[in-house]
Amino acid sequence: MKGQRGITLIALIITVIVLLILAGVAITQLQPGGIFDRTTNAVNQYDAAANNEATQINDLTNIMDNYMPNNL
């Protein structure tokens, strides 16, 4: 009976230490330069690439319209 309590107490202590480490890592990621900043940067890059692609497609469409007859 006494040995089981010791093992349970050790398991509890190890669990608390692991949870503290995980909480520290999560808090570090939420600070500036963490996951939110990287996500915002990725969204901005995606928007810029999408706008660039739309501009290029419109330019090519205009060029094609100049060389193709209008009655197609």
Image (spheres, grey):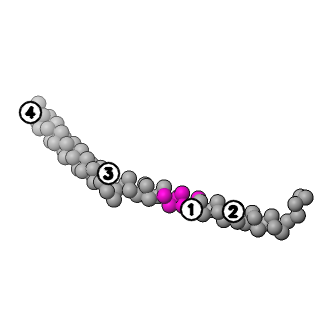
Binning the other alpha carbons within 10 Å of mark 1 as few (below 14), some (14 to 19) or many (20 upward) gives few
Tag 2–tag 3 contact (CB < 8 Å): no
Is residue 45 rendered magenta in the image?
yes
In the displayed structure image, the side of residue 39 where residue 13 appears, left or right: left
- Whole-number angstrom distance, CA of label 2 to CA of label 3: 38 Å
- Whole-number angstrom distance, CA of label 1 to CA of label 2: 12 Å
Dot placed on the residue nearer the N-terminal end, 4 or 1: 4
| Secondary structure under the numbered disc 3 in the rendered image | helix
Binning the other alpha carbons within 10 Å of mark 3 as few (below 14), some (14 to 19) or many (20 upward) gives few
In the displayed structure image, the side of residue 55 where residue 68 appears, left or right: right
Tag 3–tag 1 contact (CB < 8 Å): no
Q: Which residue is mark 1?
A: 49
Q: In x, y percent, where is residue 38?
A: 40, 58
* Rendered view: 7 above or below 61: above
In the displayed structure image, the side of residue 8 where residue 43 appears, left or right: right
Q: Which residue is mark 4?
A: 2
Name the residue rendered at 89%, 58% in the picture: 72
> Which amino acid does the dot numbered 2 rest on?
Ile
